Image: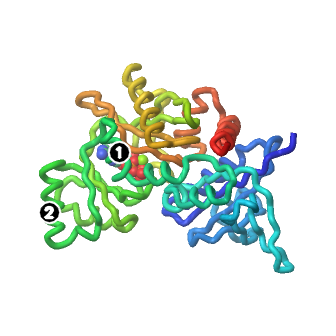
Amino acid sequence: MSKLTVAVLFGGRSSEYEVSLVSGSTILRGLSREKYDVLAVGITKEGRWFLYEGDWDNIPEDTWQQGECRPVFLTADPCVHGLLVPASDGRMETIHVDVLFPALHGKNGEDGTIQGLFQLSGIPYVGCNTLSSAICMDKSITNSLLEGMGIAQAHYLWFFAENYSGEGRDKIRLKIHERLGYPIFVKPANAGSSVGVSKVSCEEELDAAVQKAAHEDGKIVVEEAIVGQEVECAVLGNGHPIVSGVGEIAASAEFYDYDDKYKNGTSQLYIPAHLPEETMEKIRATALRAYCRLGCSGLARVDFFVRKSDGAVLLNELNTLPGFTSISMYPKLWEAAGVPIPALLDRLISFAFERNL
Ligand SMILES: Nc1ncnc2c1ncn2[C@@H]1O[C@H](COP(=O)(O)OP(=O)(O)O)[C@@H](O)[C@H]1O
Ligand SMILES: [Mg+2]
């Protein structure tokens, strides 16, 4: 059987560029050499695309751009079915690609924008399509749709950052006071990896938190702070997806922030979560329902809180391109279910082809 050519995209114009370098190298190394010819496509923080032919060890170190890089283009023309690389004589060389594998997180990678380009290119791609990626990226849209489905979540409200000034600021403060109280979480609607997220315990801290979130996105989501456990499960598949067991995160910091996720690494993951069986069943069923109703395909990690006071299961968010580092929950949950990373990647690729039929 001839090998399939997989192009793994890493980096990207996103605040999660560094995380993507680690996810990208995990995926590059996890793909079976017997089944696939693997191309590494690096996207810089500025959004420039390169075919990277150097040592993969330089990717997580972020020194790949000093290595063997050739400019590369993905065209919207479906007749090409591959990547275009300028040759030395000025002509374009085409490298055929069977499937695109985005190892990108956050803006421009997980939000439907690049998925739109993939769709136009006619090349099958791993993960959610444009619409479901865009929906799940925007926490205000996700929350509104989940509310419509009757899926429980933290009380929330959202506003445009530009309206947080003068009288608008007073109105927003009043709404927060009346509807949510304190403490609250303030987040950019479109971001990830806890970038721009703050816990706010009183009104005096609000301005700084809004400013921090507004640095990432023009839309701000505010939620009541939930006291309880933070748990996640992994969903895999298209029309009839499967769901993993439930994992728990015990953050070492005040909340599961960026440093805790990727730098200090002192937070603990427990698989399975410390929860009664019936609560875990509820989480798994809710994850599947949200995944299907929001039109997800390929994969997503669905994150929840379980409130301490009453055991309520509250959906926090869906991540359509979850972290794929060796310490990340998504691959770990499948590993615990007997699916190691290479087999997981095989399945993700076959779901990309299945959806493209
Ligand atoms: N309503 C909330 N109650 C309690 N903790 C929260 C709440 N919202 C967010 N957090 C904490 O902040 C972290 C990041 O927020 P999250 O909504 O997951 O955004 P991101 O997309 O950046 O991961 C969560 O993992 C959790 O630790
Ligand atoms: Mg999160």
Residue 19 lies in what quarter of the image? bottom right
Q: Residue at x 33, y 32 (%)?
A: 313
Residue 11 lies, with reference to residue 251, above or below; the image says below
In the rendered image, is residue 257 in sight? Answer: no
Residue picked out by circle 1: 145
Quadrant housing residue 304: top left
- Label 1, secondary structure: give it: helix
Density class for disc 2 (Cα within 10 Å; few <14, some 14-19, many ≥20) is some
Tell me: is circle 1 under 8 Å from ligand 1: no
What residue is shown at x 53% (from left), y 62% (from top)? Answer: 108
Spot occupied by residue 171 in the image (x, y as percentages of width and height): 14, 62
- Earlier residue among tags 1 and 2: 1
- Count the labels in the image: 2
Q: Residue 342, position in %: x, y?
A: 70, 38
Q: Nearer the viewer, residue 261 or 223?
A: 223
Residue 58 screen position, x and y as percent: 70, 61
Residue holding disc 2: 171
Which element type, helix, strand or loop, lies under badge 2?
Answer: helix
Q: Is residue 284 left or right of residue 224?
A: right
Q: Nearer the viewer, residue 355 or 54?
A: 355
> Would residue 25 be found to the left or right of residue 234 on screen?
right
Which residue: 44% across, 43% down?
Answer: 294
